[in-house]
Amino acid sequence: MSRLLEVRGLQTAFPSATGETRIVDDVSFNLDSGEVLALVGESGSGKSMTALSILRLVPKPGRVIAGEIKLEGRDLLDFSVSEMRRVRGGRIAMIFQEPMTCLNPVVAVGAQVMEAIGLHDQIGQVDARARTRELFAEVGIPDPEARLDAYPHELSGGLKQRVMIAMALSTRPEILIADEPTTALDVTVQAQILALLSDLQRDRGTAILLITHDLGIVNELADRVAVMYAGRLVEVAPRQELLSNPLHPYTRGLLRSIPALSPPGVRLPEIPGVVPSPDHWPNGCRFSTRCGERFEPCAEIFPEETAPTSDRRVWCHAVDASSRDPEGEAL
Amino acid sequence: MDVESYVVSNSVTLGLVLACVWVARVVGREPIWRDAARQLWSRRRLAIVVVALYMTIGLVDSIAWKGGIPEDVVDVLPNAPLTLLDRAFLGTKEASYSAPFASVEFYGAEALKRPGQHPFGTDILGRDVLYLSLKGARVALLIGGLTSLIAIPLALIFGVGAGYFGGRFDDFVFFLISTLASIPGLLLLIALIMAMGRGTLSVCIALGVTSWVGFCRLTRAETLKLRELDYVSAARALGVPELRIVIRHILPNLAHLIVITFVLMFSGLVLSEAVLAWLGIGVDGSWGQMIDGARDELSRDPIIWWNLSASGAALFVLILAVNSVGDAIRDVLDPRTLKDSS
């Protein structure tokens, strides 16, 4: 698998009363072709901002202040506006959380997909329509011909999400960013959409950056998982290892609080407290205010990246200490 | 200018008719609009018929050509272009005043040329009041329509631009709006008309320039809301250029506002013109001017009422019908009053 996307030291900031608040801070990860990387975290942890930063669509007045986003070796941050426009939709496509509001209510859905095709390929109306029909069939929309002229309000949430996926796939992107693609859908439809994404990834070899807060979805789809907390990565690991042997206390807390894993009648273990607002993030480890295992340096010094094995990375003083102690090194 | 005004008027009329046909075809093609039109028709049949009647009168009064005047008609210049309406009322001018359906002149007790054939009587110059009232329809439609066509695009360009792009342009538009809002509207109107000279077009431009501000604020606010919506973000994530987003995704979602504003603005503008006519700077042949002229006649004895009533009623019925249609359009199109949409 070749390295498709390489994000290094990404920092995205919004102006605040005290200067700039880094909503995304020093985030680095890779995405290989054909791979599904899940970006996991609570609301407000900066997952969506990371995705928008990659497409350079951070809403104003926010901006990317540092880092590199390399798409096959070229930094997207150096791209001109028109080059970037070709990347969006052409090489990196995105699907959003709310299929209800992602389609223009006054334009027929077929026309919206055809518009996306027309932007990146010079083909005629008839061909575009035929391609849209194929795409609709591919994403499992029943009776695609009739659906081409349907308006969004005539479709169910699941169908709308399928239209969104068709639109995102219309130009055969290499990377698909799926921002909580199933959050707004009910459970059975969720499963169908996940199966669809999984099929597409297998058949087309599209790399997927899956943004979610649902570890159940991670378990079904992801190859690797990156856990974010308060704008920072806390742990990156292959799915199996992360789920069976989480190293960071936050990851452990997340896994413990999955309803299906705890016996009935027992109060679900939760992570105490809430994510602090960006203005109140601690200097040290961002999770230190809620961590049950914190010790002396946690609140003051941000933990260094440690790599327990070659394909895992974790940012935690406790892990750091345990991995170094056997060699007798001081903290 | 080499082109005579009746040629311009004829071609504009043709253009408008073609535009109406095109709009009707578009409305017929898009199910959303077709439904809205059907609902509108079932709700306000009478008002729509009345508006259509006025438009027909305006149309009849817009088609003009030269020649074809009978020799014995003396009150028309031999080579003047006459509209269909003018031709229908050829030779209805009397020597003087008469009441509706009267057979004799009002003050002189002389027999009329066409006894009993002035259903609304004649005015002090002997002109048939029915004819004048019908003539007023075209002027009213012209003022309402042309001014809206000036004001609404202006408001859209500034409002959507300010709302979508924000920044410097937004500051500029707000400066413009604040400046215009701080000048008394009527005074600015009068000043503009005085500066451009009197005439239908200059009255329309002046009214247009002073009436776009309200709609501009509305479109700006609405655009601010729309640009944050997911389908605009989704379009951006697909690499749709900004201008195309505005045209494809913002403007169509403002369409209901445009239609509603057009209709409501229309009636307001016709009324504004009546005020201008009262100030002596209106458009020639408008109902406002007729009302203004009839004002002094009210003090005569016996009272001269038909002049004022005819023009007043013509104005009133049009405004009432247009407002009623506008109200129904708002009910049909405004998403907040929609019942059957998701």
Image (cartoon, coloured by chain):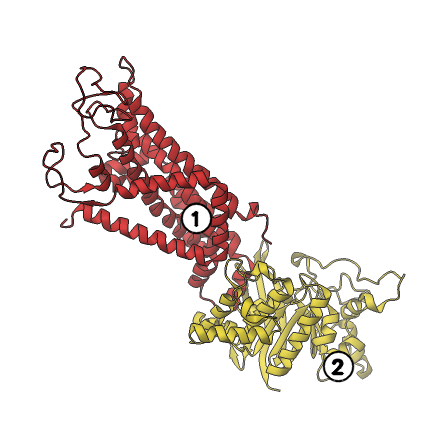
Chain colours: A yellow, B red
Q: Disc 2: which chain?
A: A
Q: Nearer the viewer, residue A175 or A314?
A: A175
Locate residue A217, reporting x and y percent: 72, 71
Dot 2 corresponds to which residue? A308
Disc 2: CA contacts within 10 A as few (<14), some (14-19) or many (>=20): some
Dot 1 corresponds to which residue? B258
In the shown orientation, is residue B302 left or right of residue A137?
left
Q: Tell me whether the residue at label 2 lies in contact with that at label 1, contact meaning CB atoms closer than 8 angstroms.
A: no
Q: Quadrant of residue A296?
A: bottom right
Classify B225 as above or below A203.
Answer: above
The span from disc 2 to disc 1 (Cα, nearest Å) is: 63 Å
Seen at 54% across and 57% down, the residue is B228
Q: Disc 1: which chain?
A: B
Q: Secondary structure at mark 2?
A: loop
Seen at 50% across and 66% down, the residue is A112
Q: Nearer the viewer, residue B182 or A281?
A: B182
